[in-house]
Structures are given as C-alpha cells and as structure tokens.
Image (tube, rainbow, N blue to C red):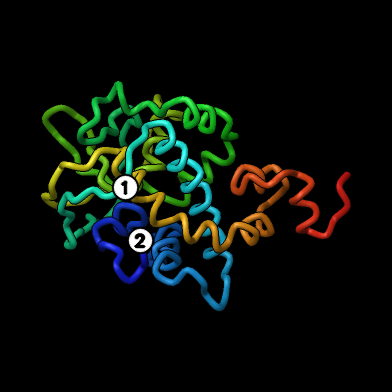
Amino acid sequence: MAAARLDQGLLFEIAPPILASGRPTVVACLRKLIQNPDPKLWSPKLKDALRLAALTYQIVERVVSDSGVVSGSTSARSNKQKLERGWLSVPASTLVWTGSAAKNVRPLRRTQKFLDDLPDVVVDRLLGWTTPVVIPNAKNGENWVVAGHVPAVIARQRRPDAAVRVRWLRATIPRKRSFFDVCADTLEVLAPLYVLHRRFIAEISIDDWEAQFLTGYSRAHFFRLKGWRDA
C-alpha cells in the first residue's frame, strides 16, 4: 500500500500522532517514517520508531499467518480523529475489539509463542513507545481499541492484571473492523518499510538477541553485519 495512497484513518490506527510534553512520541515518529520511509537523517527517536515498526511487523505477520485473514477491508474510516488531552489508566483486561469476542482476542499459535518469548524489558519498552487509543464504554467498563492495537494486545497478554496507559478518542466511527482486519492492513503497510531497512534494523539493534527477534537474522549474521568475529 503506497504511502501516497495510504488511508489517513488506517495511518491513525497504526501510528496515532501522540505527543508527550508537546513533543512527538516514538509512535508519532513511526507515523512520519511510514510517510517518508527513507529519511536523510536518522535521529535516535526515528531509529526507535524503526525498531517499533519491526516489532509490530513481526507480531502482525504472525497474527495474519495464524488467522488466515487477508488485507483489503473496505470499511469506512474516519479522517477526523481527535484525541482528548491527558492520559487514562485502565485495566488491560478491559481492552476489546469489535467483531472479536474477548475470549477470541487471544493470539493464536505462532503469535502466542512470539509474545510469550518477549522479555519483560521489551514489553515495557514497547508500552513506553506506543499507547493504545480507546473509546471507553461506560455501560460495561470495556474500552474499545481503535488505534495502537499491537500494544493493546501485548498489554492484554503480558500484563492482564495491570493497568495500562491509554489515550481517549472522542469520536463516533464505524465499528466494523476486527483486530485481525487491522493486523492484515498493518502488515501490508509496514512490509515495504521492513524489507527496505531490515539490515539497518539489525545494525541498530541493542544486541544479537534483539536483532534476531526483530529481523530473524542469526547471531552469526548479526556479528558479520557488525564486523565482529562470532564468539
């Protein structure tokens, strides 16, 4: 899905323009990176955004593989998203998706293994980089996820009994897209970015383990990219 044709509602679902203290967060930088996938200068925050893109890609690729869903949802999306000021803290177990009963939100085999293997430090980093955006339902206490879907599902899976920080979208938008639909479209958007920068993602990874997690490169391949001798 070319950036020039990228639906603005879908862009919001993948990378909402969230600010912190008036400055773009890592997920907001991912938004810029999707729109301009080959920047001339890689700031530290843009590098983190690329690592976020790689981790998101790895997760949605597994969701799509497990579920068999295909991209191409024709559901209308709103282009007039307005985030409320400030943050909310909600139980991770209240995060839900339209078209998917809560019991079915649990990821499938490949996805579950990947999430289970995520170390706590990576989970904490991801939840710091990006934030679920929700529409609260005061009647039943659920929070319908409309953007930031990957951190939402990670929070549900890895922090089910904890509170997670979210942003509130005050809007009325069609509730026709399931978590699986969003993952399929996200994969289509992020795949070109991931393929373009896969080697660079390995090079900027903290260590060989992260490089393998984000890119699938072996430990030996990582050390060859770094110019180091495999220990």
* Residue located at (28% from left, 56% from top): 10
2 and 1 marks in contact (CB < 8 Å): yes
Q: Say what amino acid the circle numbered 1 marks.
A: Ser
Q: Where's the N terminus, which quadrant? A: bottom left
| Residue 122 picture quarter | top right
Q: Is residue 126 left or right of residue 200?
A: left
Residue at mark 2 to residue at mark 1: CA–CA distance: 10 Å
Residue that extends furthest to the bottom in the rendered view of this protein: 40
Instruction: Look at the numbered disc 2 and give the secondary structure of its residue.
Output: loop
| Residue 130 position in % (x across, y down) | 42, 50
Please provide percent x and percent y for residue 43: 57, 70
**Image-based side of 17 in relation to 34, left or right:** left
Q: Where is 36 relative to 70, above or below?
A: below
- The residue at the point 31 percent across, 47 percent down is 71
Circle 1 sits on which residue? 71
Q: State the image coordinates of residue 212 (x, y, percent, origin top left).
A: 66, 44
Residue 162 visible, this angle = no
Point 26% across, 33% down: residue = 96
In the displayed structure, 198 sits above or below 73; it is below
